[in-house]
């Protein structure tokens, strides 16, 4: 039986290749029991061009945890995304 998993952090990034597309100052990653991953975060910096490119990957610096970004929504300083399986 799968369980809900939550990961919170102060620094996260969406990357387009080696370029940082978005820097997050606070984020929350959730894995639902069904296996789906989601991301919510507060944007500290955004490269308006890079964030429209793909593929994007969400990573937690210094931890080696990475997820493909499946869908992405940006509203003001809040980012929400559906993530693929952890890589």
Image (tube, rainbow, N blue to C red):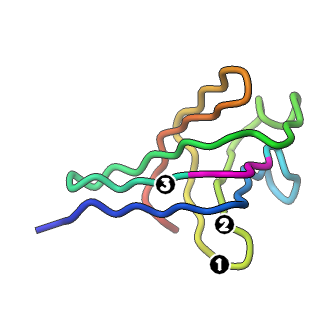
**Is the residue 11 above or below the residue 77 in the image?**
below
Give, as a single range, the part of the protein colored magenta: 23-27
Q: Please, which residue is most extreme toward the top here? A: 75
N-term-proximal mark, 1 vs 3: 3
**Pointer 1 and pointer 3: residues touching (CB < 8 Å)?**
no
Q: Please, which residue is most extreme toward the left here? A: 1
**Pointer 2 and pointer 1: residues touching (CB < 8 Å)?**
yes
Percent coordinates x, y for residue 6 in the rendering: 40, 61
N-term-proximal mark, 3 vs 2: 3
Q: Nearer the viewer, residue 42 or 17?
A: 42
* Callout 2 crowding tier (Cα within 10 Å): few <14, some 14–19, many ≥20: some
- 30 relative to 55 in the view: left or right: left
Percent coordinates x, y for residue 54 in the rendering: 71, 40
Percent coordinates x, y for residue 13 in the rendering: 74, 55
On residue 63, the disc is: 1
What secondary structure do most residues of the magenta stretch adopt?
A: strand
- Tag count: 3
- 12 relative to 69 in the view: left or right: right
Q: Nearer the viewer, residue 17 or 81?
A: 81
Mark 3 lies on a secondary structure that is strand
On residue 5, the disc is: none
For the N terminus, give its image quadrant.
bottom left
**Which residue, given by chain and number where applicable, does mark 2 sit on?**
60
* Callout 1 crowding tier (Cα within 10 Å): few <14, some 14–19, many ≥20: few
Question: Which quadrant would residue 2 be assigned to in this image?
Answer: bottom left
**Which residue, given by chain and number where applicable, does mark 3 sit on?**
29
- From mark 3 to mark 2, how far is it between C-alphas? 10 Å
Q: Residue at x 47, y 65 (%)?
A: 86
- From mark 1 to mark 3, how far is it between C-alphas? 14 Å
């Amino acid at each position: 039986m799968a369980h809900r998993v939550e990961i919170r952090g102060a620094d996260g990034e969406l990357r387009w290749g080696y370029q940082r597309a978005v820097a997050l100052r606070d984020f929350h990653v959730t894995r639902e029991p069904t296996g789906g991953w989601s991301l919510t975060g507060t944007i500290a910096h955004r490269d308006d061009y890079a964030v429209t490119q793909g593929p994007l990957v969400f990573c937690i610096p210094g931890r080696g945890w990475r997820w493909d970004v499946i869908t992405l929504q940006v509203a003001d300083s809040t980012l929400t995304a559906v993530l693929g399986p952890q890589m």
